[in-house]
Image (cartoon, rainbow, N blue to C red):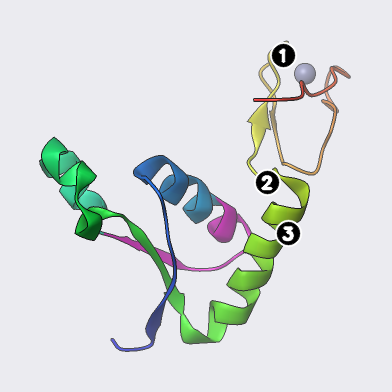
Amino acid sequence: MSDWTKLITADDPIEAGFLRGLLESAGIAVQVRSMELWTAAVEIYFSEGARPSIWVRKRDLEGARRVLERRDEHGEGAPWTCPDCGERLEAQFTSCWQCGRVREGGG
Ligand SMILES: [Zn+2]
């Protein structure tokens, strides 16, 4: 299908995975391309062409850009897991609703 368009090229597979989770949690369908090359051969890791790129449907492009802008503003966006009780929490929560533990900064 030709209605996919490249949103951004990630620096590494870790960022690609992070961005993918961010977009999917916002309800946006995502394709990550070139990822399979990373696992297939480590040396490709360092070549320009192997940087994973994030693709979204054209109709999702504006929404996806807003998601990325929000991430840049807040410097966060990934869900986190409470170290005390193990509850999984969305990024907007700054403390655990289960046990009250405050989210640790930095990271
Ligand atoms: Zn907790």
Q: In the displayed structure, does residue 40 sit left or right of residue 14? A: left
The alpha-carbon separation of the residues under discs 1 and 2 comes to 21 Å
The image quadrant where one finds the C terminus is top right
* Mark pair 1, 3: CA separation: 28 Å
Q: Is mark 1 within 8 Å of ligand 1?
A: yes
Q: Check disc 2: other Cα within 10 Å, few if <14, some if 14-19, many if 20+.
A: many
Q: Which residue is mark 2?
A: 77
Q: Secondary structure at mark 3?
A: helix
Q: Nearer the viewer, residue 48 or 70?
A: 48
Q: Residues within 10 Å of mark 1 (few under 14, many from 20)?
A: few
Tag 3 and tag 2, C-beta contact below 8 Å:
yes
User: Is-magenta flag for residue 32?
Assistant: yes
Residue at the spot 69% in from the left edge and 24% down from the top edge: 87
Q: Secondary structure at mark 2?
A: loop
Q: Which residues are magenta?
A: 22-33
For disc 1, the marked residue is: 85
In the rendered image, the vertical position of residue 76 relative to residue 94, given as above or below: below
Split into 4 quadrants, where in the image is the N terminus? Answer: bottom left
The image's mark for residue 70 is: 3
- Residue at left 31%, top 89%? 2
Earlier sequence position, callout 3 versus callout 2: 3
In front: label 1 or label 3: 3
Q: Are marks 1 and 3 in contact (CB under 8 Å)?
A: no
The x and y percentages for residue 48 are 24, 56
Furthest-right residue in this view:
100
Side of 15 relative to 46 (left or right):
right
In the picture, residue 81 is in which quadrant? top right
Closer to the chain start, of discs 1 and 2, is 2
